[in-house]
Image (spheres, rainbow, N blue to C red):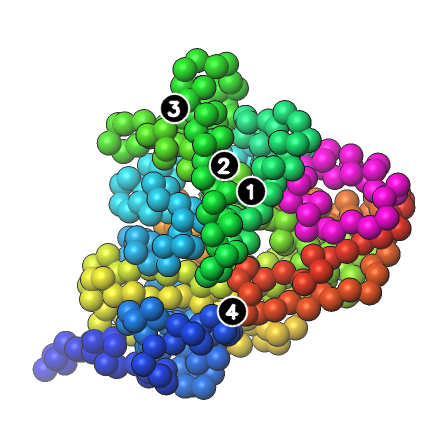
Amino acid sequence: MNAPPATALPVHRAIPQAQGFDNTIALLEEGYRFIGNRCDELGSDIFGTRLMLRAVVCMRGEAAARMFYQPGRFTRKGALPPTAMASLQGHGSAHVLDGEMHRVRKAMMMSLQSPASRARLVALAEAGWRERFERWPRLRRRVLIQEAQAVLCRAACAWAGVPLASVEEEVMRTAEFSAMIDGAGAVGPRNWLGLALRRHTDRWAREHILAVRAGRPTDPESPLAAIAFHRDADGEVLSNADAAVELLNVLRPTVAVARYIVFGALAMHGYPEWRARLAGGDDATLEMFVQEVRRYYPFIPAMGGRANLAFDWNGLHFEKGDWVLLDMYGTNRHAGTWPDGELFRPERFAERPGSGFDLIPQGGGDPALGHRCPGEAATIELTKSALRLLASEIAYDVPDQDVAIDLARIPALPASGFVIENVRRV
Ligand code: HEM
């Protein structure tokens, strides 16, 4: 006799529920640890609760990531607080598209990330670092987050085909991108500042799109040209507003890589033996270190998705529209995947094949088929090159400062931004 078909239970009835009617305040108070704290308390990698009065399923771990990143299963539309969405990828971007529209737009975004294009970006950033290394010995103290953001902003703009004309412009654009990144996880003034500046940056990006569309000569290989003349799956070019949004969506996250550079510098300070190893410039060593930086340190806490269709998973039934939050921070440290995950240990990446769903600071699965970040390789290369240069071309002192990382503040950073002084050329 055939066994009767297994009946999956409605997810909200079948999983443990977190205490309290709504946990929005707890989320704001606990930040990166919100999902992990409840998973630990409930002894479950999945639980239900309410956030902003909406029912949500929170999950962590490799299996949850594999389920979440099944192509086409979850849309990002209506899955993130509007304030975060507006400061991050923005309305009209690839991030909020689905199906064929997403596939075609994403292919264009990925075409900007060829190895040759990445190498050009890294070379521009390296030139920026070396310019600063010339100047720093004459200056008393530098705050690394500010320096890294400025180096990356200038490099990203030159790479994309919108070079910055003056130091004033560099300062302004860097401040705008940095405020958008910093405001994305906030509620209140920090978020409003990001949004206010975003309007200014949107205008600037739109002027560039209009200018190339009106015939201003530009490198046809540049991201600016690719975005301005891209045709979506419906055969239409992007509106000026959406093209500006996508231009910012390659510039702003490149500036965001500064946070990994700062976390990497903090780790080099904490583990000086690694500083010496990175100075040697061996690529495999740099790769291990940077992967551990991306695994260990907090950046994007979680990703939201709303089910595009009804489906069953592990005996649970999800309805179309169900809201899910995948804990990225918690998955990167999950004890089932990462023994001693709370320790910083780059060796763990020596000859580790990876499953595509175990290390997910920038999403999981195949970036061409889903929403995984197309800029991951660029992020890794920019961080590797910056840490190699900081370790091998200069020496510096690290004065007493508060480098504590507040896990309730999203996005997190060492409080001081990592101050260095007495810089010498090596
Ligand atoms: C600090 C470095 C970065 C972090 C932490 C980061 C993180 C992420 C995350 C978490 C997502 C969303 C994944 C999802 O929806 O499931 C994403 C998407 C995206 N990222 Fe990144 N990213 C970084 C750097 C970059 C860079 C350098 C670029 C481009 C130059 C980039 C471009 C994008 C784009 C266009 C998307 C939308 C993809 C889609 O929806 O299909 N990111 N990123």
Quadrant in the picture for residue 53 = bottom left
The residue at the point 20 percent across, 78 percent down is 9
The residue at the point 50 percent across, 23 percent down is 221
Q: Which residue is mark 4?
A: 32
Q: Residues within 10 Å of mark 1 (few under 14, many from 20)?
A: many
Between disc 2 and disc 3, whose residue precedes? 2
Residues rendered magenta in the picture:
125-151
Q: Residues within 10 Å of mark 4 (few under 14, many from 20)?
A: many
Vertical placement of 361 versus 207: above or below? below
Q: Which residue is mark 1?
A: 176
Asked whether the beta carbons under mark 2 and mark 3 sit within 8 Å of each other, the answer is no
Please name the predominant secondary structure of the magenta segment in the image. Answer: helix
Between disc 3 and disc 1, whose residue precedes? 1
Q: Nearer the viewer, residue 1 or 210?
A: 210
Q: Residues within 10 Å of mark 2 (few under 14, many from 20)?
A: many
Helix, strand or loop status at disc 4 = helix
Q: Which mark is residue 138?
A: none
Q: Which residue is mark 2?
A: 201
